[in-house]
Image (spheres, helix red, strand yellow):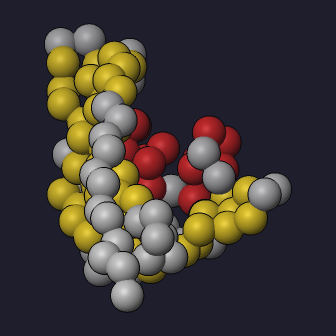
Amino acid sequence: MTRQETTTRSVRMERHLNHPPAKVWRALTQPHLMKEWLMQADNAPAPGQTFRLTADWGELECRVISMTPESTIAYTWGDGTMDTTVTWTLTPTPTGTMLRME
């Protein structure tokens, strides 16, 4: 039996949006808005719950691991070989929201 190597890699992106955190939060958590920029979601993400994201190429079953309304949401998906966690962080600015995805 060989030992499986684990490598953690991160991608971080930040964008300033000219919208208040409440509006950005809705785009991250309301299925009809998620469909417009990400993928179709079968229900709204909620703490400890699962939701499914669907695209032409397939689907992802996600589990919300943490959520602070209008501040952060983190969810995970994977099959045990390439598990992924995405964390969205919203920071209010004088002119909108700094959105960070990691």
With 11 as the anchor, is 59 left or right in this view?
right
Measured as percent of width and height from the top left, residue 29 is found at 44, 56
Q: Residue at x 20, y 45 (%)?
A: 71
Q: Which of the 4 image quarters holds residue 22?
A: top left
How far from the left and from the top, in percent, is residue 101? 34, 37
Q: Is residue 101 visible?
A: yes
Q: Which quadrant of the rendered structure holds the C terminus?
A: top left
Vertical position of residue 54 compared to residue 52: above or below:
above
Front in this rendered view, residue 13 or 8? 8
In this view, the residue in front, 75 or 24, is: 75
Depicted 30 relative to depicted 58: above or below:
above
Q: Residue furthest top?
A: 95
Compared with 90, 20 (above or below) is: above
Residue at figure coordinates x 30%, y 62% from the top left: 6
In the image, residue 18 sits, relative to residue 72, either above or below, namely above
Residue furthest front as drawn: 1
Q: Of 57 and 74, which appears nearest the observer?
A: 57
Residue at 57%, 50% (x, y): give it: 34
Residue situated furthest right in the rendering: 56
For residue 63, what is the image quadrant?
bottom left
Residue 1 percent across, percent down from the top left? 37, 87
Numbered disc total: 0
Question: Measuring 46% from the left and 64% from the top, which residue is drawn there?
Answer: 82
- In percent of width and height, residue 55 lies at 74, 57
Left or right side of 45 for 7:
left
Quarter location, residue 7 = bottom left
Q: Is residue 22 visible?
A: no
